Image (cartoon, rainbow, N blue to C red):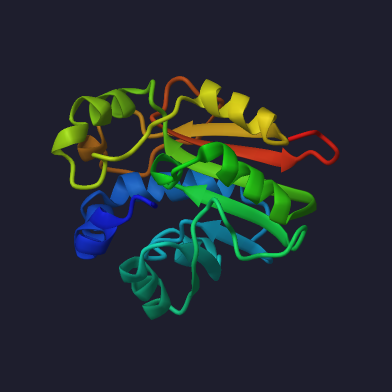
Amino acid sequence: MPKIEAFQKYTDEYENWFVKNKWAFLSELKAIKKLLSRVDGVIEIGIGSGIFAKPLGIIEGIDPSDAMRKKAEQKGLKALDAAAEKLPYANASVNGAVMITSICFVDDIYQSFREAHRILKKDGFLILGYVDKDSPVGKDYLKHKNESMFYQEASFFSTKELYDILFQTGFEVTETCQTIFGKVNNITEIQPVNHGFGDGSFVVIKAQKVNGRDL
């Protein structure tokens, strides 16, 4: 079963986090936009309330939480009832897919990436935005995981782990960037977006679909 209980109960608290941590949110958006080369025909897997999709210009996605889908629909977005492991799209039918702060909530990350690979067109891309498990913020989230209304059931990943899983599911990493340097609640301006990973706590990976690789 998808890990949606907290998102069903705390939809307002979810959105309020991004208001309270405005500069961190804007920094994350900046990092995603740096690698998001197009939005036409791009979907969000785990669209949630549309908090990222709307400012990115993405108009459609999927989410297993009806409470979150309602929020997204109120923003004028199309939100389909589905989970990452079983996407309601035909083979090779979308230009790109993004998964932003959602990979830690899927039940099966390998199947989720295989499904993304299936629905992407020949030159399609997958973009991941997430908190790196090995980063300062990631380590803090893990330490206080059981105290969080959202992260109790989450599974965090390091960037190196994701590189390996992407390779195994038919992708080639083409770009990686990072932002969020220091504690989230201490950020008072939009932070820089640097190449690579290892310093910033929020990492964005862009991976290209590789055709013909056995999955």
Q: Residue at x 26, y 37 (%)?
A: 184
Residue at left offset 64%, top offset 50%: 116
Q: Count up the numbered dots.
A: 0
Q: Nearer the viewer, residue 190 or 46?
A: 46
Residue at 20% over, 62% down: 9
Does 148 sit left or right of 154 as displayed?
Answer: left
Whether residue 182 is visible here, answered yes or no, is no
Tell me residue 183's x, y (percent). Answer: 25, 31
Q: Quadrant of residue 5?
A: bottom left
Q: Which is more toward the observer, 36 or 191? A: 36
Q: Is residue 187 left or right of residue 44?
A: left
Q: Is residue 194 above or below residue 125?
A: above
Residue found at the very far left of the displayed protein: 147
Asked if residue 18 is positioned above or below residue 189 in the image, the reply reads: below
Q: Which residue is the extreme one toward the front?
A: 1
When the figure is inspected, residue 205 is found, relative to residue 18, above or below; the finding is above
Q: Residue at x 32, y 28 (%)?
A: 138
Name of the residue lying farthest toward the right: 212
Q: Is residue 191 visible to the viewer in this orientation of the structure?
A: yes
Residue 107 at x, y percent in the picture: 44, 43
Task: State which quarter of the image contains the C terminus.
Answer: top right
Which of 13 and 199 lies nearest the eye of the viewer?
A: 13
Dividing the picture into quadrants, the one containing residue 19 is: bottom left
Q: Quadrant of residue 113?
A: top right
Residue 199: where, in percent of width, then height? 43, 21
**Measured from the top left, where is residue 11 in percent x and y?**
25, 63
